Image: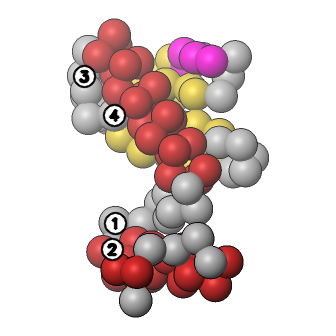
Amino acid sequence: MGGNVEKLIQILQGQVVLFMRGRSKKWQCRYKLADKKWRRTSTGESDQVAAGKAALRIYYEGEVKRANKLPIDTKRFGSVADAVMKAMQTELDEGTGKAVYH
């Protein structure tokens, strides 16, 4: 990690790490999901306790997305729609999909 990091706070045995950059008033977090990739994002919070709660929410939402084979890092609707359509087609191919998937 580059920049002026002042303080690191580990949560969930280091799976989630809170930090504040030198020129920022908002806490950032980095987190590692079961796929072993580190991701970074802002918690959007300036209060440490609220930032910790936000970081945990971000982590658990990422795990749910990963478990459901949805894109974790994207903000583009098209990427999410493509992943959902692919999952629905897989279910259709396996014979477990619903008729509305067509």
Q: Residue 38 or 89: which is nearer the viewer?
A: 89
Secondary structure category for the residue under label 1: loop
Secondary structure category for the residue under label 4: loop
Marks 4 and 3, how far apart in space? 8 Å
Q: Which residue is mark 2?
A: 76
Residue 58 is situated, as x and y percent measured from the top left of the image, at 42, 37
Q: Residue 62 or 10: which is nearer the viewer?
A: 62
The residue under label 2 is which amino acid type? Arg
The residue under label 4 is which amino acid type? Thr
Q: Indicate left or right for 77 with 31 as reference.
A: left
The residue under label 3 is which amino acid type? Ser
Figure coloring: secondary structure
Residue visible at 69% across and 16% down?
13
Q: Indicate left or right for 98 with 33 as reference.
A: left
Residue 5 is situated, as x and y percent measured from the top left of the image, at 51, 29
Secondary structure category for the residue under label 2: loop
Residue reaching furthest to the right: 36
Q: Nearer the viewer, mark 1 or mark 4?
A: 1
* Membership of 10 in magenta stretch: yes
First to last magenta residue range: 8-12
Marks 2 and 1, how far apart in space? 4 Å
Q: Which residue is mark 1?
A: 75
Q: Are marks 2 and 1 in contact (CB under 8 Å)?
A: yes
Marks 4 and 2, how far apart in space? 19 Å
* Membership of 63 in magenta stretch: no
Q: Which residue is mark 3?
A: 46
